[in-house]
Image (spheres, grey):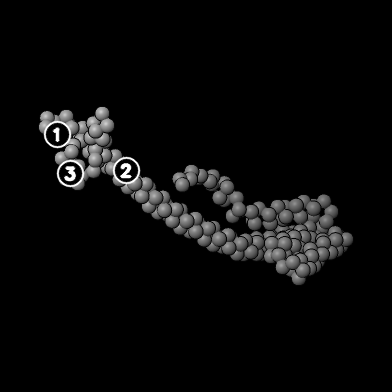
Amino acid sequence: MNEPIVARHWLAIAAPKAAPAIATTTVLALARIWNANGAEHSVGNAVLMGALSLGAAAAGVAAGNSTGDSVLVGTAFAASGALAFAGVAGYADGLPLPLLLWSLATAGAYGLAARYWRTDRRESVAYERQTSERREEYAHVERVESLRATTEIEVARSGAAYAEQLAQALITRATLPGFDPAVLERAGLPALPSADLSKEH
């Protein structure tokens, strides 16, 4: 019943919280590298990224209509937004517009992630509560069973001790001078084995 307590490293706790900012910053950095390597004012590259973004958005709509899987739809729309952001950041000259889009994308990513974090937290709290209730219920059952077993053991011990004391008393009484088992039988007490043996002999 006692499970080991595992303390998570602070990096394991902080990594999911930093993931949206890391993702949008990575897209911005790669888009600016792409910009420096010839994507600035390149209509062909802008059209390519726009087409990819629209394709990802269409895939998200199709996934939502066919399967209704929110994770798949969210992933498709996130990919669409990332491609659109990369296209604009790669096409634009200067940093103000890419930085503005980066801040909007980061805020949007944290807004979506917070919803999933709340759901996960709610499910995790419900699971912990259910596990704790089940553990308490099993602990109560174990305590009751332990008390019952202890009581049975004590009753058995007291019965054995009583039988041993009775046997000792009978043996001691049989050794006393003037003890007659026939008198006990006439009084209605059960016959003693020793008396039966003495009659047989």
Q: Residue 42 vs residue 2: left or right?
A: right
Q: Amino acid at mark 2?
A: Ala
For mark 3, give the secondary structure.
helix
**Residue pointed to by mark 1:** 179
Note whether 172 is above or below 140 in the view shown: above
Residue shown at 43% from the left, 56% from the top: 137
Question: Which callout, 2 or 3, points to the residue nearer the camera?
Answer: 3
Q: Position of residue 84 (x, y in %)?
A: 77, 63
Q: Amino acid at mark 3?
A: Arg
Q: Residue 187 vs residue 8: left or right?
A: left
For the residues labelled 1 and 2, say whether their Cβ atoms are less than 8 Å apart: no
Residue shown at 45% from the left, 45% from the top: 2
Residue shown at 78% from the left, 58% from the top: 90
Residue 186's disc number? 3
Q: Position of residue 66 (x, y in %)?
A: 77, 68
Distance from the alpha carbon under mark 2 to that under mark 3: 32 Å
Note whether 3 is above or below 77 in the view shown: above
The residue most toward the right is 44
Question: Which callout, 1 or 2, points to the residue nearer the camera?
Answer: 1
Residue shown at 13% from the left, 31% from the top: 176
Q: Which residue is at the front of the view, 19 or 160?
A: 160
Question: Mark 2 or mark 3, which has the lower sequence index?
Answer: 2
Q: Which residue is at the front of the view, 55 or 92?
A: 55
Q: Which residue is at the front of the view, 38 or 62?
A: 62
Q: Disc count in the image?
A: 3
Q: Amino acid at mark 1?
A: Phe
Q: Residues within 10 Å of mark 3 (few under 14, many from 20)?
A: few
